[in-house]
Image: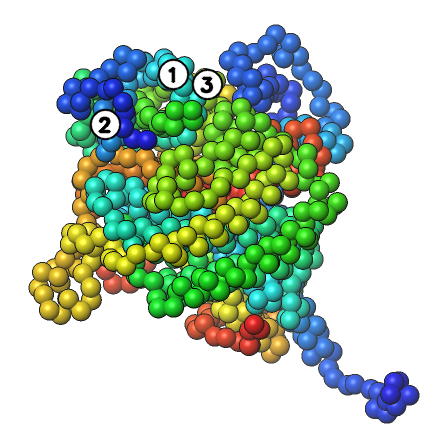
Amino acid sequence: MGLEDLNHNFLTGSIEDLVKWARRNSMWPATFGLACCAIEMMATGAAHFDLARFGMEVFRASPRQADLMIVAGRVSQKMAPVLRQVYDQMMEPKWVISMGVCASSGGMFNNYAIVQGVDQVVPVDVYSPGCPPGPETLMHSILTLHELVRTGEITKRRAETGAGAGVHVTERRVAVATPH
Amino acid sequence: MSSSTELSEGAQELQPKSRTAGLEYLREAGSVLRIPHLPEDVDEVRTDDDTMIVNMGPQHPSTHGVLRVMMELQGETVLRSKPVIGYLHTGMEKTGEDLTYLQGPTNVTRMDYVAPLFNELVFSLATEKLLDVEIPPRATWIRMLMCELNRMSSQFLWMATNGMDLGAVSMMIYGFREREGILDFFEKVTGLRMNHNYIRPGGVAVDLPDGWRDDVLRLLDIFPERLDEYDTLLTGQPIWQERTQGVGILTTEECLALGITGPLLRSTGLPWDLRKDDPYLYYDQVDFDVIVGSYGDSFDRYAIRLNEIRESMKIVRQILDKMPSGDYRVQDKKVTPPPRHRIDESMEALIHHFKIFTEGFRVPEGEVYVAVESPRGELGCYMVSDGSAKPYRFHIRGPSFVNLQALPHMLRGGMVADAVASISSIDPIMGEVDR
Amino acid sequence: MDEPDGLPPEDEPALIHGAISSLSRGQLVVHSARDDYLDLVGSLYDDGYRVCMDLTGVDYLMHMERQLPPGVRAERFEVVVNLLSTEARRRIRVRAQVPGADLTIPSIFHLHPTTEAMERETYDMFGIVFTGHPDLSRILMPDDWEGHPLRKDFGVGRIPVQFKGAPPAR
């Protein structure tokens, strides 16, 4: 056992695949929990649902160190400029998941105080429905995003139009077995 | 203080000292000593060359939501601070004026989103007081059961987030275990993990499912040992004690002057708990203790919240024994929708169902104020009805909104690191602060 | 907690510190005009109602015909203060009428420091100016927001949504 027995000790692949693998398997979210969805986001990061198995349990407070912004909660008029500023401070490549109906479309609050969909402020890659979306739905959205990164679709589209991918998650799926 | 960036909140921000000396003094000192006029020596202008105004938030790692605190620092010491809120203002009170009384709980439940059943409870109690209906006993006991379980899940969440704010990250990872157990029970009963819309005017939405007693007993068997684990993890630990003891001290007079209730008030020594002092539901028929602290610091509040979980478990055990059979909602046909199978049989039932769900039931004119004890303090609802099917005006008195006014007092003279401990011990939930 | 002891029956409005009182669903309410408001709250403070639980406003523009005891003149706005006495375990409510044309009322901050944030919120949402408040600025809306959202003539701000039977934009 050990290094002496290794015969084939070269791995070949394309740099693109390697970079995509690194990007999706350690995508660090920025802390952008606003309201009730933030509680479900924290529950997803906690032991029962465990985001750490996807390499995402470190929620970075500093936007410079974060790749993914999960807008979790309703965005009010006062918060919208702050949201845009945090998004601008993140470094490329960056992605946005709009978690919950309030972030995706204004939700049940169709009124003066709430921005009707966070895609009015930042480009969104995955929309996650629910009020709040349970941890399984959030994980499904995250895995959808990982899939988009894996195929490279999302980086190409962003370069062309500057818009987000705009994928709508439509079912609540148990993406991986939850431990008990 | 004019600022060219669009992120400035103008007059809501902390102004430099030279411009606000007298006013700030009045505001800070007046709330403790109740000085109605300025003392003579306050008008001198202090140069603020050696102090720095620092902005914390609204996006920050402390998990207590979108609260922005501006602090004036001299070195590491906080001289003045000012919380700026409104980053989660949702216009719920305005939205609620367009929703019927039956749709109301869906709206208000998202205010204090960590303990949503309390919002629904206070809204429903206010509506029922205006309606003048008597709720059946089983509905009341079910409400008490769900609210006490929600109190436990809220305090577990607080312990987890408080632990993480102070650096005990393992508390965050493990603290959600028990909350998941309670949320599983809620999902079984109400259909949702959070924001249940379960407690409605007239009773509760559905009856408890079969086997609920075993589920609750199973939870109650696991919790005491887990609580002891957290006790061992945190209470005796020197770092925890250093970070919370003596931090964010309040006195009873300060609390009453600032309208502060809940664990903050009880940590100063006054045993004020609405479940004992102004009983609602059937809290006068169950036996539990009110936990008080003695020093008024963050450690006391931590201990109070930990033991409140134990007291809630005591209450839940008694509710298990006392739960009667009966209706889970009031039988008044004008208020409660009929059971689904009756709609096929009776025309009258169909009409009532239609009227209740489209137009809503009408509530006689009047105004009431009802208060309950939420995990954060006194949660009140002031409701005005004009005789129609939608509330004319309702105002939810969120305990966190009022408790946040303690922040400048707690932070003054302390270190920046203690600021996080103090904010965390207030346990603000920005949903009910900003509504 | 809701029964007032020693008060005359409901049909005869009794006077508490010179202001007309009534019962609303068993809760004691004291009505005051704007000029007597400060003295009334001060006298209630001396009576033991030392804690102000809630201060809010109501815009009665769409419901001017509301029931008020005889002798109370209805105005467009009301400032409602809920007070609590922790020793006696009693609550009382003060409803002060504020005319829409002259939307000011004295601030009770010096008696009840808790009203600092509550009065700011009422100002933000209704435009009621509390004279004597140390720092009356907006608290929930952005600083440059125009209008006062909870007034009845301020629309909800709904945008049109594409589904059948959706309410129109307001």
Residue B302 at least partly seen: yes
Q: CA distance from mark 2 to mark 1?
A: 19 Å
Q: Earlier in the sequence, mark 2 or mark 1?
A: 2
Q: Residue at x 66, y 12 (%)?
A: B44
* Rendered location of residue B227, percent (x, y): 59, 54
Tell me which corner region of the image, top left, top right, bottom left or bottom right, holds residue B194: bottom left
Q: What is the crowding at mark 2: few (fewer than 14 residues within 10 Å), some, or many (at least 20)?
A: some
**Kind of element beneath mark 3:** loop
Q: Which residue is mark 3?
A: C111
Q: CA distance from mark 2 to mark 3?
A: 25 Å
Q: Which residue is mark 1?
A: C47
Amino acid at circle 1: Asp
Q: Residue at x 83, y 91 (%)?
A: A8
Amino acid at circle 2: Leu
Q: What is the crowding at mark 3: few (fewer than 14 residues within 10 Å), some, or many (at least 20)?
A: many
Q: Which residue is mark 2?
A: C23
